[in-house]
Image (cartoon, rainbow, N blue to C red):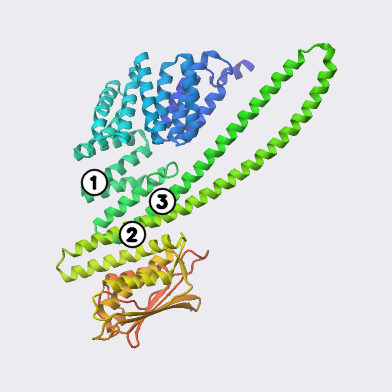
Amino acid sequence: MLLLAFLARPLTGQPEFRARQLDRAQALIASDDTDQALHLLDSLDADIPTGDATVASFQRRLRLTRARALIRARLDPAATEILIHLIDAARSADDGAVLAEATLQLAFLYQRQNIAPRTMELLTRADSVVRRYDLGSLRPELYNRLAGYYRQFGSPAEILPWAHRAQTVAAELHDSQQEALAHVNLSVGYRETDPRRSEYHVSEAARYYRNTGSLRDYFAMTLVLAGQKVEAGEWTEALAASDSSLLYVDRVIEEDSTYLHRVYELRAQIMHHLDRPDSAWYYLNLAHRAELDHLLRMDRQNLLAIQTAYESEKQALRIAEQAKTITYQRGRQQRQAVIFALVIAVLILTYFYTSRVLRSRNAREDRRRMERHNEQLSESLDQQKMLQGEIHHRVKNNLQIIVGLLQMQLRKIDDPFARSNLEDMANRIYSMAAVHEILYQQGRSSEIDFRAYAEKICRHFELLSDLPRACSFDLSLDGYWFNLETAIPLGTMFNELLTNSFKYGVAGDRPLRISVSLREHEGMLLLEYQDNGPGWSEDALAGRSSGLGSYLLKGMSRQLRGRVETANANGAVTRIWFRRKNEHKTAEPNMEISRFVPTTLSS
């Protein structure tokens, strides 16, 4: 029975079995399943007999594979530690293949940290090892690493020779993975001189990654292809490539969120050029949130890396102290018997003294660790606030650029109707940009003073207007702060009302006067807007208009779970009931809009 049980066990200790498991782990890494690959490598490492010199070569290969998995999972500190020790072990054992591969991987990590001199030094060492041991199978990877170096630190002309060599040698060796990476480098090299050839190489690389199940790399290639289509102005093809990227977003974001905001930014740009402003605005918001989420995730990863490094250093110190104690005790045991009693007394005193010192040291280390941890959290919070402010500033700048482009286009348009629509679009974009500008200026990343926002929008309209007399504003908006989800819809409606007043609210030579108030009313907020113009038309009061301004008011009020009413009382009167958005745990049902303002029709 014992013999049968022994024979029934899996042969985990056999070299053939270990080699198959290692090949399986490498296949899992190629298909982006790094978690399962690391679990499999842990099982293999646990089954290797301790102190067996015959498996030392396999252990080096196993650690090299683990480093690849950690690099794929973007755990760079852990991968760097493994590779540094592995290079020393391979050099001592004269293992050229492991030494060359470990050096190439470490060069890639330094390249990812933008350290050019150290990267080139390691690539030169790897080239020397490949030549000395005649490692022809590693030449495609070496050439691709050199092409990647010049891609990041050099010029496109320096990329192409190495990328072509990598593709040629990889094809001869049937190394499809390195051949796909060569296509990636060639696409970058031809991007400026031959865009069509660059797109071809991107497509070839994407085809390989899709067939091998490497979703993250396929996702990156579709994103690059979409960007090239956008640069070429091929918006339909760019939309198709963007659809491919979006198809794999949910399957890639959990492992790597680096390029998610770029997907949404390209999508917004495509939607803008396809004349779909609502979709463009939606994807711009997604890009903004994705960039914030990625920055927060990177902060958490950096904090975990610091904690891991600290724990490793503490463990090494403890091991060194224990080794010193053991050596000291062995030396004392060899003393002469005549001083045995004195040795015992000294040991007892030393023990109590050492214990006391260790307790004191541990207490000091704990205090220092907590202080460093609190400092790191404080610095991380300050950095997050700074990054949020910077994002608001960048979004404002981008929107201001769009407004500037629209205003430049206005100078070339003679059609009054087209000019009017383009001016309205510029004002709407400016209203969104003003929200981000005020958020950046006031230093509060989550809420905006609505009075400051309204004053800024009013000044903008007054500066752009060509009215014969100066207009006046009566704003009763003090004490109201709104988050971004509330401020943008409310600001859009306020912008539409101002547009309507400046277009149709001027009666004769009488100066335009606008009154705006905001107050609590029946459990909701009420924004009351009135001008001294001729008032609303019958069609407007009856809600029979379908212009873009009416559509925006309708959509924005529904977002805020409110309603809009219009009336005539010594001018056009508009009342907007609404609720704050995303500030309560329970959301009340949407209310139907009784009447809405047709901003594209005359009052």
Residue shown at the point (37%, 69%) measured from the top left: 491
The residue indicated by pointer 3 is 290
Picture coordinates of residue 286, whole percent (x, y): 38, 54
The residue indicated by pointer 1 is 229
* Residue 77 badge: none
23 displayed left or right of 570: right
Picture coordinates of residue 392, whole percent (x, y): 40, 57
Could one spot residue 544 in this view of the protein? no
Residue shown at the point (51%, 45%) measured from the top left: 300
In this view, 491 is above or below 197: below
Q: Nearer the viewer, residue 503 or 10?
A: 503
155 displayed left or right of 81: left
Query: Number of callouts in the render?
Result: 3
When asked about the image quadrant of residue 345, the answer is: top right
Q: Secondary structure at mark 3?
A: helix
Earlier sequence position, callout 3 versus callout 2 = 2
When asked about the image quadrant of residue 369, the answer is: top right
Dot 3 amino acid type: Ala
Separation of marks 2 and 1 at Cα, in angstroms? 21 Å
Picture coordinates of residue 422, whole percent (x, y): 23, 66
Q: Secondary structure at mark 2?
A: helix
Q: Quadrant of the N terminus?
A: top right
Dot 1 amino acid type: Lys
Separation of marks 1 and 3 at Cα, in angstroms? 23 Å
In this view, 447 is above or below 575: above
Dot 2 amino acid type: Trp
Picture coordinates of residue 4, whole percent (x, y): 60, 17
> Given contact means CB atoms under 8 Å apart, are the residues at marks 2 and 1 in contact?
no
The residue indicated by pointer 2 is 281
